[in-house]
Image: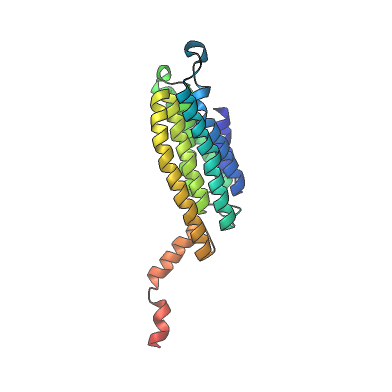
């Protein structure tokens, strides 16, 4: 769980996209294998083959397949850094720190420690979900926002795995398929956007749309002259 919090803080400060992808891959491996890590080995013995298989598949998809897809999108888009974030990297780190403090405070108020696999699962999952939302809303690069979606999904998966193991696995698999499709679509979209407009900066694309709305007939002005 401590690695998750460290990863959240590192993501908030990461400007290099490759570094952010590596951190998300690490999170993916951890959350994928979490059912094995949280298994009560003394009371229940070895986990079922089904649980081991699902955990391994989850870890491979989250820790290998999705990061490779994002790395491919980064290479094709020729984008290396998040240069001008909406919220600075230092302020983002401070916000994540505040979310971690708030997450632990909420975890204490809920008083559900007897129903969860780890007492740190709730606050860490809240912090991770908040970090994902922060990356989505406070970064301009489309690929960084896709990374934010992955971090958000990791937080949701951590929450599900921490509350009830069996229920968490069912919920996690459903979300996993949706997010994999989302990352695939957004990765291809980012590549197409860069190829067409030579940028994956969503702020520039919004400005382009605003300019087009303000001057819809600009390209036809020469016809009337």
Residue 100: x %, y % from top left: 50, 32
Residue 88: x %, y % from top left: 56, 48
**Which coloring applies here?**
rainbow
Name above or below for residue 195 compared with residue 150.
below
101 and 135: which is toward the camera: 135
Q: Residue furthest front?
A: 49
Kindly identify the residue that appears in the image at 49 percent across and 49 percent down. Answer: 145
143 and 91: which is toward the camera: 143
Kindly identify the residue that appears in the image at 40 percent across and 38 percent down. Answer: 175
Kindly identify the residue that appears in the image at 49 percent across and 48 percent down. Answer: 146
Locate the N terminus and report the quarter of the image it occupies: top right
Q: Residue furthest bottom?
A: 225
90 and 148: which is toward the camera: 148
Q: Is residue 26 visible?
A: yes
Residue 207: x %, y % from top left: 46, 63
Q: Residue furthest top?
A: 43
Name above or below for residue 169 compared with residue 197.
above
Q: Is residue 137 visible?
A: no
Q: Quadrant of residue 212?
A: bottom left
Name above or below for residue 66 compared with residue 204.
above
Residue 14: x %, y % from top left: 59, 45
Number of residue marks:
0
């Amino acid at each position: 769980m401590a690695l998750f919090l460290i990863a959240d803080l590192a993501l908030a400060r990461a400007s290099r996209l490759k570094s952010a992808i590596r951190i998300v891959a690490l999170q993916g491996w951890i959350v994928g294998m979490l059912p094995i890590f949280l298994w009560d080995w003394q009371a229940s013995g070895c986990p079922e083959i089904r649980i081991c298989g699902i955990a391994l598949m989850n870890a491979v998809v989250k820790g290998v397949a999705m990061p490779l897809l994002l790395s491919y999108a980064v290479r094709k888009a020729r984008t290396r850094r998040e240069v001008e974030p909406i919220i600075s990297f230092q302020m983002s780190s401070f916000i994540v720190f505040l979310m971690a403090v708030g997450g632990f405070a909420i975890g204490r108020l809920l008083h559900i420690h007897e129903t969860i696999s780890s007492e740190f699962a709730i606050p860490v999952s809240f912090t991770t979900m908040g970090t994902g939302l922060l990356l989505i809303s406070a970064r301009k690069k489309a690929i960084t926002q896709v990374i934010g979606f992955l971090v958000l999904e990791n937080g949701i998966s951590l929450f599900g795995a921490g509350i009830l193991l069996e229920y968490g696995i069912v919920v996690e698999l459903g979300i996993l398929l949706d997010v994999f499709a989302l990352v695939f679509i957004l990765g291809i979209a980012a590549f197409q956007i860069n190829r067409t407009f030579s940028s994956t900066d969503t702020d520039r694309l919004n400005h382009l749309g605003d300019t087009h709305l303000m001057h819809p007939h600009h390209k036809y002005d020469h016809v009337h002259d």
